[in-house]
Image: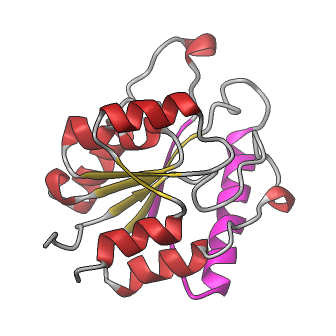
Amino acid sequence: MRSVPDAVFLDRDGTVMEDAHYIKSPSQVRLIPDAAAAVKRINDAKVPAIVVTNQSGIARGIFKVEDYEAVRRHFESLLEAQGAHIDASYYCPHHPSVAGPCDCRKPATKMFEDAVRDFKLDPTNVAYVGDRWRDVIASKTLGGRGIMISSRMTTEEDRRKAQEDGIETAASLKDAVEMLFRSS
């Protein structure tokens, strides 16, 4: 029997809300069906729901930090309207083709490490949920449990890498949360 995780790290685009490629306006925000209920289940378990997201559109000049923040606020308000909340959001504004490599862009682990520090978490007892391999591979580097869900953005290469790395898979965020809290 697995223990309840100390926190659930959630990718945003393609996991909790639809990925519309470089979301720069609140009007583009659409929650994935059942995502709010899944986040609420995390909340009801008194487990922090923490968004960790790459936002390379900032580095590429497609949108500004202010646009990202407006989208984040609207995204969170849609969740709150359904009784769910996000405890914290961490984002990487970089892209290696613009500014070179950084320590925070997933699959790098700095955003996760920052959240572990900020929330005083046991990194071996957290969950990483996302629709891409880069969202969940930190589970092998830092410890914890990775669950990759399927979205239209999940590539066959991501599926292959997840399988090779022994990362669990689920059809949706709802299913991943069921897996996390099944025995609790």
The magenta segment is 64-92
Residue 87 magenta-highlighted = yes
Q: Quadrant of residue 167?
A: top left
Residue in front for this viewpoint, 116 or 137: 137
Q: Position of residue 54 (x, y in %)?
A: 55, 38
Look at 53% across and 60% down and name the residue there.
Answer: 171
The relative height of residue 37 versus residue 166 in the rendered view (above or below) is below
Asked if the magenta segment contains residue 62, the reply would be no
Quadrant occupied by the N terminus? bottom left
Whether residue 86 is visible: no
Q: Is residue 17 visible?
A: yes
Q: Is residue 184 left or right of residue 85?
A: left
Q: Is residue 98 above or below residue 51?
A: above
In the rendered structure, the answer to whether residue 52 lies left or right of residue 64 reads: left
Quadrant occupied by the C terminus: bottom left
> In the visual, does 89 lie left or right of 95?
left
Q: Position of residue 89 (x, y in %)?
A: 49, 56
Q: Position of residue 96 (x, y in %)?
A: 55, 15
Q: How many marks?
A: 0
Residue 70 locus on image (x, y percent): 73, 58
Identify whether 135 is placed above or below 31.
above
Which residue corresponds to the image point at 54% horizontal and 63% vertical from the top-left?
A: 172
Residue at image point 26% right, 61% down: 119
In this picture the colour scheme is secondary structure
Residue drawn 32% across the image and 31% down it: 164
Determine whether 118 is above or below 77 in the image. Answer: above
Pick out the residue farthest to the right.
27
